[in-house]
Image (cartoon, helix red, strand yellow):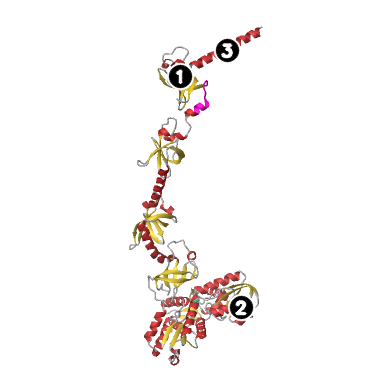
């Protein structure tokens, strides 16, 4: 006889969680009693076993006294029960299955949006009673096609299912309900564990001569497994415990399938199989059990399907007897990222097995470690090729920054952050930096990065571009970087050029600060450059009009102008007419009287008035005369006197 165990059978995630919680609580009771509202699970053997340890099922919460402890089982309860428990000052341990909680939330939402809630399920079942409580007990419970057909028409209905329904029943009733309102929202809330167990039972029932379904007679999901099995197999036996096995009958079959409800503990399944050992080879059967389960080990990378996503965790079906949980911290190295930002229900993902049992029967998984394993290889290659990689700054730590690079934590020393000195490293938190890996050791899990290198390379590139674009005589833009006694350094975008003090102004200056200041934007002329010597000569005055040009623009021959004697030689005196513009008064042009040499009649620094008698633009020379000015004045006076005399004569006559 061949025995095959269904791929998915026995404890589901929700029941496992409730039983583990209860086991943990009874461990420390020291003779006291705790309570569950109704039997913790629909399996009398398991309930009896827990009762012996101190967990007593009660039917009415009024039986409880202040300070006592009550476990809410995986079916969940209505809000009114929770309120009553609070009033009684009873400590509540809530093991409501997250799948059921999701249904509570959904019906509450839609009730608030004025939908009539329709629950497909058994109206006596505690889960259905609890769900109805979450829509103020105003939901309609439907369990047959006839009930669905007789339903009156509503404006808007929202349809949910008891989590342990069969898909066929849910589908058939939903189709009728589609006609029962103007707006119909249908949600398949049959839980994943139920679907998996029913599908496994169905597949198995198709290929065996007999099916043994193990589970409580009041267990809804076990009864559904019986229902599904009967559709595909003529010989189905529903038992609660090994003693009920019809060994005689079973010995007539060649192939027997075994499945178990979600509330059937492993030890009961094993007892049943051990008993069947009497009619077959026990080792083969145990092997069958083992083979039916996916084996997992710490460090494995598995494929899984996201069952649901909350703000703190992601539940994943990994085809193991327990589902897996990825806590937020194991999703990504980015502490700001939320589970819902990364995954949606139904996503196929790869997970890393962190721990097979987190103490509550769940498998602890990680996605960040899967990525990390793959990313180590990528980073090793990038290190070898010295490629740039983006890293996000997590926080500043002693001596530098803690960064996340492809989900792996690395370190960036303070000296490698920037070409500039950074006083306060905390300003980098959250920034993404282009960087290169400068030290890499996968065994020691060490990655050291530098964004300074990238900055330097960028600057070098810019510098080369500037060198390549320089042309003598070209006018370019820059910013004054610093001043010295001999000139001003100008930043041309990563490369500095110098304006010598003599090229800052057409006038004589004592210090560059008389003309420019640090951080001032300037336009300068490229006077010369030498890449090998890393030298660029710039001129500012060359971009400004020359004093000579300005002077001759506004003055012409014959104009009388003032100036200061700035130099005297034997042949004449030089007069400064404007800053940068000097003219010459030849010795013969100083006075009508004979002058031997200028210093006989003039003094250095003396202010004089002169007449422009010639401008030689080509040689940039201005000839001045004090003598002509003197003669002009005399002539004017004479003319004025003459006019006065003639006037007097005319008047006298
Ligand atoms: S059958 Fe589904 S909904 Fe019910 S407790 Fe198990 S996992 Fe939760």
Q: Quadrant of the N terminus?
A: bottom left
Q: Position of residue 384 (x, y in %)?
A: 35, 58
Residue 514 point in image, percent of width and height: 44, 34
Magenta-drawn stretch contains 553:
yes
Residue drawn 41% across the image and 51% down it: 424
- Residue 550, horizontal then vertical, whole percent: 50, 29
- Side (left or right) of 388 relative to 111: left
* Residue 185 image position (x, y, % from top left): 59, 72
The secondary element bearing badge 2 is classed as: helix
Q: CA distance from mark 1 to mark 3?
A: 27 Å
Q: Which mark is residue 639?
A: 3
Using the image as rendered, state which of residue 621 and residue 521 is in the foreground: 621
Q: Is residue 77 left or right of residue 531?
A: right
| Magenta stretch, residue numbers | 550-559
Nearer-N-terminus badge (1/3): 1
Under tag 3, what secondary structure?
A: helix
Tell me the number on the disc at residue 585: 1
Viewer-proximal residue, 9 or 379? 379
Residue at 55% x, 71% y is 105
Binning the other alpha carbons within 10 Å of mark 3 as few (below 14), some (14 to 19) or many (20 upward) gives few
- Residue at 40% x, 66% y: name it: 369
Mark earlier in primary sequence (3, 2): 2
Instruction: Confirm or deny contact between disc 3 and disc 2 (CB under 8 A).
Output: no
Residue on which the image places disc 2: 176
Neighbor class of circle 2 (other Cα within 10 Å; few <14, some 14-19, many 20+) is some
- Would you identify the image quadrant in which residue 123 lies? bottom right
- Residue 420 appearing in the image: no
Query: Which residue lies most toward the right here?
Result: 653
* Position above or below: 421 against 437: above
């Amino acid at each position: 006889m061949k025995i095959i165990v269904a791929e998915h059978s026995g404890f589901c995630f929700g029941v496992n969680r409730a039983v583990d919680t209860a086991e943990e609580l009874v461990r420390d009771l020291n003779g006291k009693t705790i309570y569950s509202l109704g039997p913790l699970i629909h399996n009398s053997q398991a309930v009896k076993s827990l009762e012996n340890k101190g967990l007593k099922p009660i039917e009415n919460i009024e039986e409880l006294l202040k300070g006592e402890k009550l476990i809410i089982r995986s079916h969940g309860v209505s809000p009114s029960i929770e309120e009553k428990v609070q009033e009684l000052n009873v400590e509540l341990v809530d093991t409501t299955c997250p799948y059921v909680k999701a249904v509570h939330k959904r019906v509450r939402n839609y009730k608030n949006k004025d939908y009539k809630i329709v629950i497909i399920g058994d109206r006596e079942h505690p889960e259905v009673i609890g769900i109805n409580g979450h829509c103020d007990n105003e939901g309609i419970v439907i369990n047959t096609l006839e009930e669905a057909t007789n339903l009156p028409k509503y404006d808007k209905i929202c349809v949910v299912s008891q989590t342990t329904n069969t898909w066929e029943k849910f589908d058939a009733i939903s189709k009728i309900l589609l006609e029962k309102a103007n707006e119909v929202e249908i949600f398949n809330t049959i839980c994943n564990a139920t679907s998996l167990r029913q599908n496994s039972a169905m597949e198995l029932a198709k290929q065996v001569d007999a099916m043994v379904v193990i589970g409580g007679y009041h267990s809804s999901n076990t009864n559904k497994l019986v229902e599904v099995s009967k559709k595909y197999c003529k010989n189905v036996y529903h038992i609660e415990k090994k003693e009920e096995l019809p060994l005689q009958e079973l010995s007539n079959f060649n192939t027997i399938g075994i499945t178990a409800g979600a509330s059937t503990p492993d030890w009961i399944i094993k007892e049943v199989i051990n008993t069947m050992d009497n009619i077959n080879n026990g080792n083969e059967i145990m092997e069958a059990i083992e083979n039916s389960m996916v084996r997992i080990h710490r460090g494995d990378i598995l494929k899984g399907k996201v069952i649901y996503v909350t703000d703190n965790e992601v539940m994943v079906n990994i085809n193991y007897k327990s589902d897996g949980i990825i806590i937020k911290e194991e999703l990504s190295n980015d502490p700001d990222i939320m589970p819902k930002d990364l995954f949606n229900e139904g996503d196929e993902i790869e997970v890393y097995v962190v721990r097979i049992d987190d103490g509550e029967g769940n498998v602890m998984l990680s996605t960040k470690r899967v990525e990390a394993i793959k990313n180590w290889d990528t980073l090793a290659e990038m290190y070898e090729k010295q490629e740039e990689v983006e890293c996000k700054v997590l926080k500043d730590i002693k001596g530098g920054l803690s960064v996340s690079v492809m989900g792996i934590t690395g370190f960036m020393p303070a000296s490698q952050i920037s070409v500039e000195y950074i006083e306060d490293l905390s300003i980098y938190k959250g920034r993404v930096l282009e960087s290169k890996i400068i030290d890499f050791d996968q065994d020691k899990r060490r990655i050291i990065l530098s964004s300074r290198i990238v900055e330097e390379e960028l600057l070098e590139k810019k510098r080369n571009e500037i060198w390549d674009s320089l042309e003598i005589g070209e006018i370019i833009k820059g910013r004054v970087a610093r001043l010295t006694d001999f000139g001003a350094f100008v930043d041309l975008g990563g490369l500095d050029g110098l304006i010598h003090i003599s090229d800052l102004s057409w006038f004589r200056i004592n210090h560059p600060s008389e003309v420019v200041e640090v951080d001032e934007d300037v336009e300068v002329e490229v006077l010369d450059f030498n890449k090998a010597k890393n030298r660029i000569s710039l001129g500012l005055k060359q971009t400004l009009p020359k004093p000579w040009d300005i002077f001759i623009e506004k003055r012409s021959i014959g104009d009388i102008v003032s100036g200061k004697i700035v130099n005297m030689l034997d042949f004449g005196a030089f007069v400064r007419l404007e800053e940068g513009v000097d003219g010459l008064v030849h010795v013969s042009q100083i006075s009508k009287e004979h002058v031997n040499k200028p210093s006989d009649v003039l003094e250095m620094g003396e202010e004089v008035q002169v007449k422009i008698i010639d401008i030689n633009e080509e040689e940039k020379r201005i000839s001045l005369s004090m003598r002509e000015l003197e003669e002009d004045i005399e002539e004017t006076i004479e003319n004025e006197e003459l006019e006065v005399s003639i006037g007097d004569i005319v008047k006298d006559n």
